[in-house]
Amino acid sequence: MGDERIRRARETDVPAMVALVHELAEYERAPQDCHLTGEQLHDVLFRPEPKLFGHVAEVDGEVVGVALWFLNFSTWRGTHGVYLEDLYVRPTQRGSGLGKALLVTLARECVANGYGRLEWSVLDWNEPAIGFYKSLGARPMDGWTVFRLDDRALAELGAQD
């Protein structure tokens, strides 16, 4: 059961997946912030106990979409969940159902494993994606703001006693 265009990522998919992540960074207007390499992605996806997981969308032997995700944990629910780090389908394939098929696959992963939720972030200006997610029954988490420590601020906080 499921869309035959969607499958778990294989080691041979890594170069295409890296390219798709870089395309996503370009689409999100931040290509200068994307530094992912094939070596990095391969290491986290295919180590003995991976911490990152991936699915790809394939059409005519070409990887044209990607979903990269990891487990999180809800202390309130007492269960793991899936955090979708990246979901991207090439513009030429949008409207073909691949984005929905990737999300259906992840929802099935959650249900099969007893994970309590599937979450992700979307840029507030990305109206096409927001509309798509709402059409699937996803809801924005109003009242929550994402915070991030990185680069210098992260190093400075980590250096405090």
Image (cartoon, grey):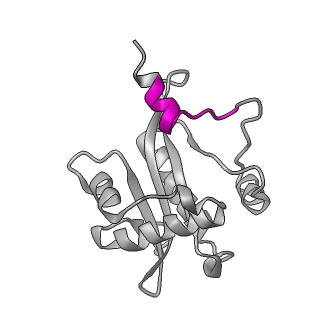
Taking depth in this image into account, of 60 and 4 the one nearest to the observer is: 60
Q: Position of residue 149 (x, y in %)?
A: 53, 33
Q: Position of residue 106 (x, y in %)?
A: 50, 54
Q: Does residue 107 show up?
A: no
Q: Position of residue 83 (x, y in %)?
A: 51, 44
Q: Is residue 48 left or right of residue 105?
A: left
Q: For residue 128, which quarter of the picture?
A: bottom right
Q: Is residue 146 left or right of residue 17?
A: right
Extreme top residue here? 161
Q: Does residue 55 show up?
A: yes
> What residue is rendered at 64% in x and 76% in y?
91
Q: Is residue 1 left or right of residue 24?
A: left
Q: Is residue 152 on the magenta stretch?
A: yes
Taking depth in this image into account, of 37 and 158 the one nearest to the observer is: 158
Q: Position of residue 84 (x, y in %)?
A: 53, 49
Taking depth in this image into account, of 18 and 158 the one nearest to the observer is: 158
Seen in the picture, residue 93 relative to 37 is either above or below; the reply is: below
Q: Is residue 153 left or right of residue 91?
A: left
Q: Quadrant of the C terminus?
A: top left
Number of marks in the rendered image: 0
Q: For residue 102, which quarter of the picture?
A: bottom right
Extreme bottom residue here? 60
> What residue is rendered at 58% in x and 64% in y?
24
Start and end of the magenta stretch?
145-156
Q: Is residue 136 on the magenta stretch?
A: no
> What residue is rendered at 64% in x and 35% in y?
146
Extreme left residue here? 48
